[in-house]
Amino acid sequence: MHRLAEDSSNVSWSNHAIDQMLDRSISDLQALKVLRTGLIDLDDIEPGKNPGEWKCKMVANIKGNRDVGVATLVVNGQRLFVKTVEWEDL
């Protein structure tokens, strides 16, 4: 995921993710930083609805002591589709 996120043209955003970023004052640059540097709980990786999809959530600290979670589909190992973006409650 880190490698794919380095090129932002590999990342697409659902309308829901965009709405959530606006509502939560999380910028696309912050969400990209999470995708580029965040961590995944390997136990939380699961198959997506379609063949070749994997669902997971990347988490990284963005502001002070708050973490941001970016729920993402990896599509055929070639693209990232961001489903939602959220603050992780500490």
Image (spheres, helix red, strand yellow):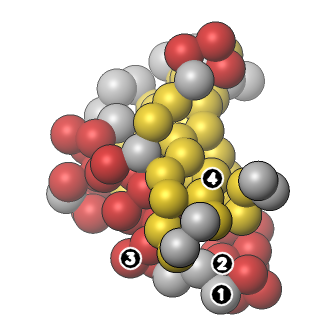
Disc sitting over residue 25 in the figure: 1
Callout 2 secondary element: helix
* Callouts 2 and 1 close, C-beta under 8 Å: yes
Residue 23: quadrant of the picture: bottom right
Residue to which mark 3 is pinned:
29
Residue shown at 72%/64% (left/top)?
Answer: 87
Gap in angstroms between the C-alphas marked 4 and 3: 13 Å
Residue 41 in the image: state x and y as whole percent. 57, 23
Camera-nearest residue between 21 and 73: 21
Disc sitting over residue 69 in the figure: 4
Callout 1 secondary element: loop
Disc sitting over residue 21 in the figure: 2
Tell me the amino acid under the disc marked 3.
Leu
**Dot 4: few (<14), some (14–19), or many (≥20) neighbours within 10 Å?**
many
**Dot 3: few (<14), some (14–19), or many (≥20) neighbours within 10 Å?**
few
Residue shown at 59%/66% (left/top)?
Answer: 65
Q: Is residue 87 left or right of residue 40?
A: right
Single out the mark in the foreground, 2 or 1.
Answer: 1
